[in-house]
Amino acid sequence: MNLRSETAKGTALSAPATLYVGLLVAAPLIILIAYSLWTQTYVDLDRTPTLANYREALTDPLVRHLMIRSILISAAVTVVTVALAYPIAYFIALKAKKKTLWLLLITIPFWSSYLLRVFAWKLILGFNGVMNSALLALGLIDEPLTFLLYNEFAVVLTLAHAWAPFAILPIFVSIQKIDPSLLEAATDLGSNKLESFLRVTLPLTTQGIIAACLIIFIPTVGDYVTPSLVGGSDGKMIANLIQVQFGAANNWPLGATLSLLAMLSVGFVAIVFVIGASTLGRRIR
């Protein structure tokens, strides 16, 4: 009787969360799958189940090109962001005296709109932007640089800045959890600072690094605002094509198909990364 009561309480407590997930995650996904099996000729929607959209998407060179580019850009953003975030998280966790103040400073970019931050980078990297104006004033260049904006470089730079706090925080937490006695033991055994970092700190923060990579990689693949504003034709990603299908092209079935294929591709890459990173982390330990 007591067990039944506890089960009923657990069910009652989890019911709101289950309903929330069902309405906002499962239901839209089911609708997306249903739409991907239909066809549309701009106005008329044919609900006859078919795999025509999948065949079209998988055989279209543009889709493959944008998908590969999206994954590569997101991977570059992940590497750059985590590489820059780790030293900052390390400093805050082990060296900084006022950790709360530093964490507050990290969150300052979130006080402004994401769209405003992207526009700010557009002004910085533009032909007559802050960067070119400063270089011209210093006499380092004779004419404005054209490769700073409307390419993959601009997309990577902008996304790395926008998502940096999401990489710093999980790494900070993982470093914060390290027992100081382990670092002291490594020093007592004759390890220098570099050896202590490579043999103790880095292996123990593997989970934080993996979490940071996933937090950065998964959402950036689906970003379409940044590529639209600073990417130009060379920085477009798969999300931009999906947005076109749901918008100007008014082809929701194909847009749903591309969305599902993007989700599957990202999920596959993420699973491979987690398995590989976890195996490497165990070997390092």
Image (cartoon, helix red, strand yellow):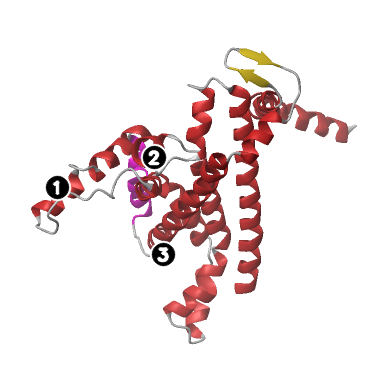
* Res 260 → quadrant: top right
In the rendering, at what x and y percent does residue 114 appear?
A: 37, 35
Pointers 1 and 2 in contact (C-beta within 8 Å): no
Instruction: Report the disc number at residue 133.
Output: 1
- Pointer 2 or 3: first along the chain: 3
Residue 143 horizontal side relative to residue 173, left or right: left
Q: Number of marks in the image? A: 3
When the figure is inspected, residue 61 is found, relative to residue 282, above or below; the finding is above
Q: State the separation of the CA atoms marked 1 and 2.
A: 24 Å
Front tag of 1 and 3: 1
Pointers 2 and 3 in contact (C-beta within 8 Å): no
When the figure is inspected, residue 28 is found, relative to residue 138, above or below; the finding is above
Residue marked by disc 2? 233
Q: State the separation of the CA atoms marked 1 and 3.
A: 39 Å
Residue marked by disc 3? 94
Residue 141 horizontal side relative to residue 2, left or right: left
The N terminus appears in which quarter of the rendering?
A: top right
At a point 31% along the width and 33% down the height, the residue shown is 116
In the rendering, at what x and y percent does residue 285 appear?
A: 61, 73
At a point 49% along the width and 49% down the height, the residue shown is 74
Q: Amino acid at mark 3?
A: Leu
Q: Amino acid at mark 1?
A: Ser
